[in-house]
Amino acid sequence: MSRLRAEGLTLSYDQQVVVENLGVNVPDGEFTVIVGPNACGKSTLLKALARLLGPRAGQVYLEDKPIGSYSSKQVAHRLGMLPQSPIAPGGITVGDLVARGRYAHQSLLRQWSSQDEAIVVEAMRQTSVHELAKRYVSELSGGQRQRVWLAMALAQQTPVLLLDEPTTYLDITHQVEVLDLCADLHEQGRTMVAVLHDLNLATRYATHLIAMRDGRIVAEGDPVRIVTAEMVEQTFGLKCRVIPDPETGTPLIVPVDRAVRRASAKQDQPA
């Protein structure tokens, strides 16, 4: 069984059901990426897997136990989460925020140590924010803040790491740097799960892809196997060609020319 999975999951905001009777297994040791159009339920699913959103029905299991049976600190030892657009406390420096990733490891018997300090410094180095350690988070750009939050998640040092749109606010160079870091963490043995909007980056980095639409899973598996023009159109409503990426050989999605799309739309209209 997967370390992290959900069975019969129904998720809602107030009375609006977003996901209904969904089952999903997060493969251990894989880099899973969840993709889909806006409002399809991908971020909602990630929140439920992280215990940030309670299900209306069904259950999330972490290490074969209902995730609700763990204390918050026990969950934090097993699972890290970088939410979408997190908000930092006022007046906090970068170094202090990243250090909060170690709080789950503190107790009356185990106070802050040189090992904690080394882990925080390394997390900041990996995300290229070490030179910002004494700056206030409120002074940073959106891209810098995103990398600081990722550093905090890394400092938590959990075997499973969930990332909700980790490349938000980042330019293309920093998007690739962050995803390269995620790939490195995966190769080091961590189970990674990320929600991404860029389908081409998703197919390049994912070892396991979950495509969602309208709160259900359309396709799941190795991107090389499941990403086809038909799957992309079924999931996103986009006519495209899928060709091998010249750098990696992974699927590369190329939208058809707008003139072709318009001609096709006219043909599909009733007479």
Image: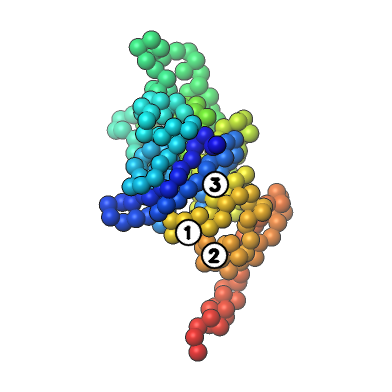
**From where the camera sits, is residue 140 visible?**
no
Q: Which label number is shown at residue 213?
A: 1
Residue type of the residue flagged with mark 2: Gln
CA gap between label 1 and label 2 equals 9 Å
Residue type of the residue flagged with mark 1: Arg
The residue under the point 57% across, 78% down is 264
**From where the camera sits, is residue 56 visible?**
yes
In this rendering, position of residue 87 left or right of residue 185 = left
Report helix, strand or loop for mark 3. Answer: strand
Mark 1 is surrounded, within 10 Å at the Cα level, by few (under 14), some (14 to 19) or many (20 or more) other residues, namely many
Q: Nearer the viewer, residue 265 or 76?
A: 76
Residue 45: x and y in percent read: 43, 47
On the image, which quarter does residue 65 sit in?
top left
Report helix, strand or loop for mark 1. Answer: strand
Q: Are marks 1 and 2 in contact (CB under 8 Å)?
A: yes
| 93 versus 164 height, above or below | above
Residue tagged 3: 33
Residue tagged 2: 234
The residue under the point 53% across, 24% down is 122
Residue 14: x and y in percent read: 27, 52
Residue 211: x and y in percent read: 53, 54
Q: Nearer the viewer, residue 207 or 2?
A: 2
Residue type of the residue flagged with mark 3: Val
Q: Earlier in the sequence, mark 1 or mark 2?
A: 1
Mark 3 is surrounded, within 10 Å at the Cα level, by few (under 14), some (14 to 19) or many (20 or more) other residues, namely many
Labels 3, 2: front one: 2
Labels 3, 1: front one: 1
Mark 2 is surrounded, within 10 Å at the Cα level, by few (under 14), some (14 to 19) or many (20 or more) other residues, namely some
Q: Quadrant of the N terminus?
A: top right
